Every structure is written in structure tokens, then in C-alpha cells.
Image: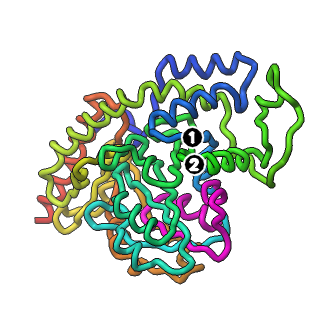
């Protein structure tokens, strides 16, 4: 057993990242300004889109994307139940109706065939979630959207580095939304981004993010700025600050290095845990795709392992190993199940995954010894219970 608790996902920032934030604090400009502009430019080049708008969360990016596409009351948006609730909450917030499509049992991403079954005359958009970093089938989703005149707003919170057919995922949808939360592959503590090739959507998202004003604070108050402004429409307060952006600018410089380290840890987990009874690991990525490698999840088969998911989580905690559960399917939460009359059995694949999935510690900051501690603890627990049970 470890002497100290190993957190499921704790960021460990570098000196340059910390220094960039300190420099910003000393600069005299803290809110949206040059650092935000720099992050937007670097990020749009990284994902390969024409425009990127920095925001205070991925939730804001998803919400403003739907607003910019004029999706609202009377419209339906199809998404997966196997996601963090924010992916679905934003549909409710714009007044539209979320329609769930079950997941593929192998990839755990939204199943295109299930999407087709749920199309109606009110369907206006699809929100695919690249779950755990694994790309959804963007060729199929793009075909469905094009055939039915639908918009695609991608939830790329787990998949900054994700690719389909050797192209970044951002190039496939109308808008791609990203999270820079503390545990994400690129972090600004809190933050997000909307990336698109459409100038009209980028402009509207930018205006909506700051009360509907046609100028940012930097445009109004910096040297050479003009203090007057116009309000194009009633907007929101979802802008990113330079303090957060400073962290993101430096973090983006390290994203490929950190991705390589996560790949090393991923490969070691796959090699050293794949033989355990009752422990199912992620399916290999498809050809010409790149997995974002955000979460390393496992699925427990109690009959084979002798212990269920909840028991495994508690046993790992007793070994001082933190875990996560990603996710409880959204349709099982009280609000959605009661409002729409949904039951677990309505989406059986999502229900099965939600009951059995858990996430191991998985960040680029883990040392080889820490990775070894996780592997040792998982093997110890499963071998103990599987022998007792059999």
C-alpha cells in the first residue's frame, strides 16, 4: 500500500507556466487582452481551424455554439447519454429538447445507427462527445448531418489531440468545443474554446460571450482604444481572462510532450493489466485515428473478477489510489429521468457501461513508480477476489 494518497488527476505545472501567470499579474492587464488573443491564435493553428474564441468553460462554448446556430425552443438536439451532464444541460438552457442516442458497445461513443433512428423533422443538430478522447465516427456523423441539413457541435472536452482519418477532429464539425478544466490535457484551471471555420459563427460567439458588446475591454481601454461600444444583442459573461490564457499559452507549447508521456503510461497500463480476469480495457483506436488519451477507463465484470466496480473503487482507495467514475449516464439523473420519463433500460449499452466503468490515475505528471503502484494495486485486488470467488 502507498504511504500517500495518489490523486486520480492532479495537475503539476512547470516553472514557465507559473511564471507566465505571475508576469500577467504584474502586467497591469488581467482580463481579456493580448494573452487571450495569443492563445486563440495558437490554438486555432493547432486544431486547424480558421477561428477560435476563448471562453471561461467548455460549457460556455457548447451553449454559445447552439445560440450562434439559432437553436432553441421547438428544436431537438441528438447527443449521447454517456457524457458529463454539461453536454446535455446546454440543450436545456437554450430551450431545445435533448434526444439521446445509445452508444456503440465497442467504442463507447455515440452510435450513428442509433442517431438515424431518432431523427425527426425537429432535429436541428448533433452533439457528438469524443468520450475519453476516442474519436466518434466523423465520416458517418458528417454524412448524417449533410443528408438531413443538421449542424454538428462537437464536444471535444476530452480530445484536443484527437484525429479522424489523420485530420484533427475540429475540421469535421461546424463548431468544436474544448475544455481547459484543471484535469484536462490542456489546462487553464477553468476555461474553454470554440473553434470553427465559419467567421460568422466565431464573431457571434465572441459577441455573445461578452454581454453582446462589439468591443472587448482591451479594445475600449488600452492605448489607442475607443471607449464607446454598441450592444448587438443581449449576451452573457463568458469571456476568458488573460490570467487564464497565460497558463494556456505555455501549456499548449507542452501539449505534444505531455501527449507522448500519456501514451507511454497508456501503453504500460494496457500491457500490464490486459491479462486480469474480469477487467475490460479500451478497444484499440480505429485505423487513421488518434485517441486523445484523456482518461484511462476500465470496466469490471463481477462474475469473472469476483468484485464489482464500486467494490473495486473502494478497494483501490484503501490502497491509497484515487479513481474516477466517468460517467453515470445523463438519462439516469433525476431531472432528465423525471422530465422525459426515461429509464436505464431505454439505453442499455450506456446503462451497462455506467454501472461498471471507472478511471485510473492518468496524467503526464505521474512518475514511473506511481504508475507501478497503480498497476500493483489493481493486480493485487483482482487476483485476490478472483481467487476467493473461484
Give the image's coloring scheme. rainbow
Q: Residue at x 52, y 54 (%)?
A: 174
Q: Which of the two residues, 263 or 120, is positioned nearer the viewer here?
A: 120
Left or right: where 45 falls relative to 217:
left
Q: Residue at x 27, y 37 (%)?
A: 263
What separation in Å lies between label 2 and label 1 (alpha carbons)?
Answer: 7 Å
Q: Is residue 189 visible?
A: yes
Instruction: Give the image quarter of residue 20.
Output: top right
Does the magenta portion include 303? no
Left or right: where 105 falls relative to 205:
left
Marking on residue 215: none
Q: Which residues are magenta?
A: 64-93
Marking on residue 51: 1
Q: Which of the two residues, 369 or 242, is positioned nearer the viewer here?
A: 242
Q: Quadrant of the C terminus?
A: bottom left
Residue behind mark 2: 198
Q: Are marks 2 and 1 in contact (CB under 8 Å)?
A: yes
Q: Position of residue 269 (x, y in %)?
A: 22, 42
In the image, residue 109 sits, relative to residue 222, either above or below, namely below
At numbered mark 2, what does the secondary structure look like: helix, strand or loop? Answer: loop
In the image, residue 19 sits, relative to residue 193, either above or below, namely above
Q: Position of residue 363 (x, y in %)?
A: 37, 36
Q: Residue at x 63, y 30 (%)?
A: 37
Q: Is residue 318 visible?
A: no
Residue neighbourhood size for the residue with mark 2, other residues' Cα within 10 Å, grouped as few (<14), some (14–19), many (≥20): some
Does the magenta portion include 73? yes
Counting residues from the N terminus, which is met first, the one under dot 2 or under dot 1?
1
Q: Position of residue 350 (x, y in %)?
A: 37, 69
Amino acid at each position: 500500500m502507498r504511504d500517500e494518497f495518489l490523486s486520480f488527476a492532479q495537475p503539476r505545472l512547470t516553472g514557465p507556466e507559473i511564471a507566465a501567470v505571475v508576469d500577467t499579474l504584474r502586467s497591469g492587464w488581467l482580463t481579456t487582452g493580448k494573452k487571450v488573443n495569443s492563445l486563440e491564435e495558437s490554438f486555432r493553428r493547432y486544431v486547424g481551424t480558421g477561428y477560435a474564441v476563448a471562453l471561461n468553460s467548455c460549457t460556455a462554448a457548447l451553449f454559445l455554439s447552439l445560440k450562434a446556430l439559432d437553436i432553441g425552443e421547438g428544436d431537438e438536439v441528438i447527443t449521447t447519454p454517456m457524457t458529463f451532464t454539461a453536454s446535455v444541460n446546454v440543450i436545456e438552457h437554450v430551450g431545445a429538447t435533448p434526444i439521446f442516442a445509445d452508444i456503440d458497445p465497442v467504442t463507447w461513443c455515440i452510435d450513428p445507427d442509433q442517431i438515424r433512428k431518432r431523427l425527426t423533422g425537429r432535429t436541428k443538430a448533433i452533439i457528438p462527445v469524443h468520450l475519453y478522447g476516442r474519436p466518434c465516427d466523423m465520416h458517418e456523423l458528417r454524412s448524417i448531418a449533410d443528408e438531413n441539413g443538421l449542424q454538428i457541435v462537437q464536444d471535444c472536452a476530452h480530445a484536443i489531440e484527437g484525429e479522424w482519418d489523420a485530420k484533427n477532429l475540429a475540421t469535421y464539425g461546424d463548431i468544436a468545443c474544448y475544455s481547459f478544466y484543471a484535469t484536462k490535457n490542456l489546462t487553464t484551471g477553468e476555461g474553454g474554446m470554440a473553434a470553427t471555420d465559419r467567421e460568422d459563427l466565431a464573431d457571434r460567439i465572441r459577441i455573445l460571450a461578452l454581454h453582446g458588446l462589439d468591443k472587448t475591454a482591451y479594445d475600449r481601454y488600452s492605448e489607442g482604444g475607443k471607449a464607446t461600444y454598441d450592444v448587438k444583442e443581449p449576451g452573457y459573461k463568458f469571456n476568458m481572462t488573460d490570467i487564464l490564457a497565460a497558463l494556456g499559452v505555455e501549456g499548449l507549447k507542452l501539449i505534444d510532450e505531455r501527449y507522448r508521456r500519456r501514451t507511454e503510461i497508456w501503453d504500460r497500463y494496457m500491457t500490464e493489466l490486459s491479462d486480469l480476469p474480469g477487467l475490460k480495457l479500451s478497444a484499440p483506436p480505429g485505423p487513421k485515428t488518434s485517441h486523445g488519451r484523456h482518461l484511462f477507463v476500465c470496466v469490471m465484470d463481477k462474475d469473472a473478477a469476483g468484485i464489482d466496480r464500486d467494490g473495486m473503487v473502494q478497494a483501490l482507495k484503501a490502497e491509497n489510489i484515487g479513481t474516477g467514475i466517468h460517467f453515470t449516464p445523463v438519462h439516469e439523473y433525476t431531472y432528465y429521468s423525471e422530465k422525459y420519463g426515461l429509464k436505464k433500460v431505454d439505453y442499455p449499452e450506456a446503462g451497462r457501461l455506467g454501472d461498471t466503468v471507472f478511471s485510473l490515475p492518468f496524467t503526464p505528471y505521474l512518475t514511473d513508480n506511481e504508475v507501478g503502484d497503480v498497476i500493483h494495486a489493481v493486480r493485487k485486488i483482482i487476483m485476490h477476489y478472483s481467487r476467493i470467488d473461484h
